[in-house]
Image (tube, helix red, strand yellow):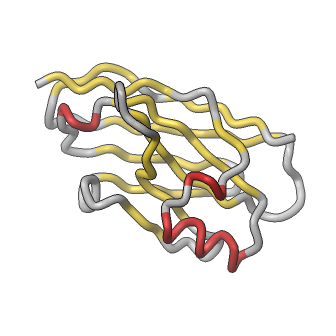
């Protein structure tokens, strides 16, 4: 079973930056399809950023140009720059043992249903 451990969340002022990190363990064969989702208070979970097996990235429009996702082996990072109050949310690392084609589709769609494993989340709070 895959375990995901997030770190790096915290409270910052608008305009500042944070870097989140997620370490996956428990899955040995192949590369995990990974990404980041978030849930704002009182709202549904939404995709933030994903990366497929070939390293192609997808971002939700509201963070495009501000956030960056990267994956090296079993570690996926999310760089959150120029943070806004609207970015305040619980951020979740997600993963799934998908084929390259499956990962490409899931990642491009920011499809939360395609990711089997979820971390416990790390809180990001942005104050204006």
Extreme residue in the bottom direction: 101
Please name whichever residue, 86 or 78, is drawn nearer the observer in this view of the structure.
86
Q: Position of residue 107 (x, y in %)?
A: 55, 66
Image quadrant in which the C terminus is located: top left
Q: Position of residue 70 (x, y in %)?
A: 50, 57
Is 66 located above or below residue 56 in the figure? Answer: above
Residue visible at 14% across and 37% down in the picture:
15
Extreme residue in the left direction: 128
- In the picture, measured across the screen, residue 105 lies left or right of residue 124, that is right
Q: How many numbered circles are shown?
A: 0
Residue visible at 72% across and 42% down in the picture:
24
Q: Position of residue 43 (x, y in %)?
A: 37, 34
Image quadrant in which the N terminus is located: top right
Q: Position of residue 99 (x, y in %)?
A: 76, 73
Please tell me in which quadrant of the rendered image residue 42 appears.
top left
Please tell me in which quadrant of the rendered image residue 85 appears.
top left
Please name whichever residue, 106 or 100, is drawn nearer the observer in this view of the structure.
106
Residue visible at 59% across and 74% down in the picture:
105
- In the picture, measured across the screen, residue 73 lies left or right of residue 14, that is right
Is 11 located above or below residue 52 in the figure? Answer: above
- In the picture, measured across the screen, residue 34 lies left or right of residue 31, that is left
């Amino acid at each position: 079973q895959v375990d995901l451990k997030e770190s790096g969340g915290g409270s910052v002022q608008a305009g500042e930056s944070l870097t989140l990190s997620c370490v996956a363990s428990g899955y040995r064969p192949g590369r995990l399809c990974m990404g980041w989702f978030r849930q704002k208070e009182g709202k549904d979970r939404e995709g933030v950023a994903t990366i497929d097996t070939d390293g192609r990235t997808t971002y939700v429009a509201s963070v495009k140009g501000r956030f960056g996702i990267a994956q090296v082996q079993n570690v996926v990072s999310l760089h959150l720059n120029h943070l806004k109050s609207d970015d305040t949310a619980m951020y979740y690392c997600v993963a799934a043992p998908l084929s390259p084609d499956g990962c490409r589709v899931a990642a491009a769609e920011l499809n939360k249903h395609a990711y089997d494993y979820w971390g416990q989340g790390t809180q990001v709070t942005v104050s204006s």
